[in-house]
Image (spheres, helix red, strand yellow):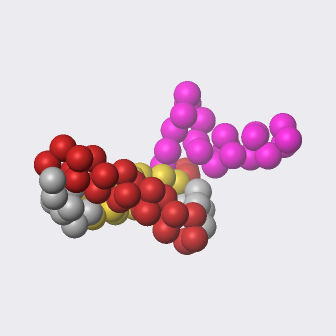
Amino acid sequence: MPFVEISMGTESLTTEQKIKLNKAISDTLLRVFQEEKGIKPPVIVVIREHSPDNWLIDGETLTEVRKRRQTQR
């Protein structure tokens, strides 16, 4: 049974976008398993959301990166 875990900052995606992401991942895994193994196992997708202040990208928190990108638009 495939298990996929995705970590992202909170508010990265809406609920609707998470559902679309889950469907795309599940469909891809099911297609590969069907083609390679001839089976369609249940696919589990877990999305873990973390505070953007706990993610650091090149020394900046994700919150700071998001703010900087907003001002650059």
Quadrant for residue 30, please give it: bottom left
Image quadrant of residue 71? Answer: top right
Q: Nearer the viewer, residue 40 or 66?
A: 40
| Left or right: 67 as drawn, with respect to 5 | right
Identity of the residue furthest to the top in this view: 58
Q: Main secondary structure of the magenta part?
A: helix
Vertical order, 67 against 42 (above or below): above
Magenta-colored stretch includes residue 57: yes
Q: Residue at x 54, y 34 (%)?
A: 57
Residue 51 visible in the snapshot: no
- From the viewer's perspective, is residue 44 above or below residue 7? below
Between residues 47 and 2, which one lies in front from this camera angle?
Answer: 2
Q: Nearer the viewer, residue 47 or 58?
A: 47
Tell me: 5 left or right of 68: left
Give the percent coordinates (x, y) of residue 41. 18, 62
**Where's the C terminus, which quadrant?**
top right
Q: Give the mark count.
A: 0
Q: Is 20 situated above or below 36?
A: below
23 vs 53, left or right, is left
Residue in the image at 22% along x and 50% along y: 33
Query: What segment is highlighted magenta in the picture?
Result: 54-73
Asked whether residue 63 is drawn in magenta, I would say yes
Q: Position of residue 19 (x, y in %)?
A: 49, 68
* Residue 32 in view here: yes
Q: Position of residue 35 (x, y in %)?
A: 23, 47
